[in-house]
Amino acid sequence: SMPTSAALDVVAKSLNLKFFEVPTGWKFFGNLMDAGQCSICGEESFGTGSDHIREKDGIWAVLAWLSILAYKNKDNINGDKLVTVEDIVRQHWATYGRHYYTRYDYENVDAGGAKDLMANMVKMMSSLDEVNTIVKGARSDVSKVVNADEFEYKDPVDGSVSKHQGIRFLFEDGSRLVFRLSGTGSEGATIRLYIEQYEKDPSKIGRDSQEALAPLVEVALKLSKMQEFTGRSAPTVIT
């Protein structure tokens, strides 16, 4: 799904594999799988599944990791040191770079303020010069924004179009910010902010995620005027 880390994009492109970027929602995966166009899927809340086992709540992911570990250790069962999950992840980072990733949830904010925040960012997308002035004013060490859009998806199977699926700011170095709005009922709305920093420098891939993402977080809050529109000085949940 679109808000999920773009680490998959880098691997798929490197291996010349076809991949799809869909809105949040398992029905989009189901359409692709039923049509034989997709065999494995995943979304930003860590749900993962495949076309032969339509499961997303943990068992599939556990079995997948066990099979990966078994493969990596097949010639080393009686060795002194087995290959670990950390070893595999660090090897991945060394090969493809690391995508530092976090999600900020602002729950039960005023629905009117949340809609105004999203509308203001849609308006800002028409002027990347203005956006980059704000970015550089917040942090000079953050890359410039090269594209901004409101994600829209046309289903290749049934032709349906899903609009207004999230606002994206894409940076020159591969980093990105994604803002999504949900639940605009009487009890308030939830704003989800996805922050992703892409790092290719091998000397910088072992940092703490929140430390590495701090400059981009600062930019995201300044761009969106989060506190001004919502009154919140901190997110409800950080994942």
Image (spheres, rainbow, N blue to C red):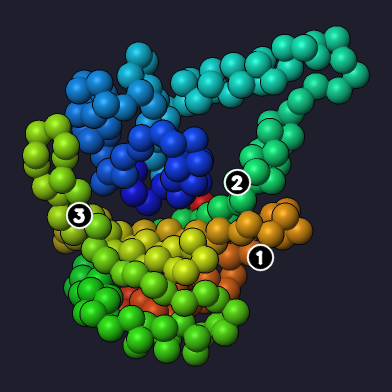
Type of residue at label 1? Glu
Left or right: where 161 falls relative to 69: left
- Give percent across and percent down for residue 59: 48, 20
Q: Quadrant of the N terminus?
A: top left
**Secondary structure under the numbered disc 3 in the rendered image:** loop
Distance CA(mark 2)–CA(mark 1): 21 Å
Residue under label 2: 96
| Residue found 69% across the figure and 46% down from its top | 94
Secondary structure beneath dot 1 equals helix
Question: Which of marks 1 and 3 precedes in the sequence?
Answer: 3
Q: Label for residue 152?
A: 3
Residue 237 seen in render: no
Residue beneath the point at 31% across and 44% down: 21
- Residue 26: x %, y % from top left: 27, 34
Q: Are marks 3 and 1 in contact (CB under 8 Å)?
A: no
Name which quarter of the figure residue 110 lies in. Answer: bottom left
Q: Nearer the viewer, residue 169 or 189?
A: 169
Q: Is residue 77 left or right of residue 46?
A: right
> Which of pointers 2 and 1 indicates the residue nearer the eye?
2
For residue 119, the mark is none
Q: Nearer the viewer, mark 2 or mark 3?
A: 2
In this picture, is 193 found above or below 142?
above
Within the image, what quadrant is residue 56 found in? Answer: top left
Pointer 2 local density, CA inside 10 Å: few below 14, some 14–19, many at least 20: some
Q: Amino acid at mark 2?
A: Tyr
Q: Quadrant of residue 167?
A: bottom left
- Residue 151 can be seen, yes or no: yes
**Kind of residue at badge 3:** Glu
Q: Label 1: few (<14), some or many (≥20) within 10 Å? A: few
Residue 120 against residue 44 in the figure, above or below: below
Residue 238 vs 231, above or below: the answer is: above
The residue carrying mark 1 is 211
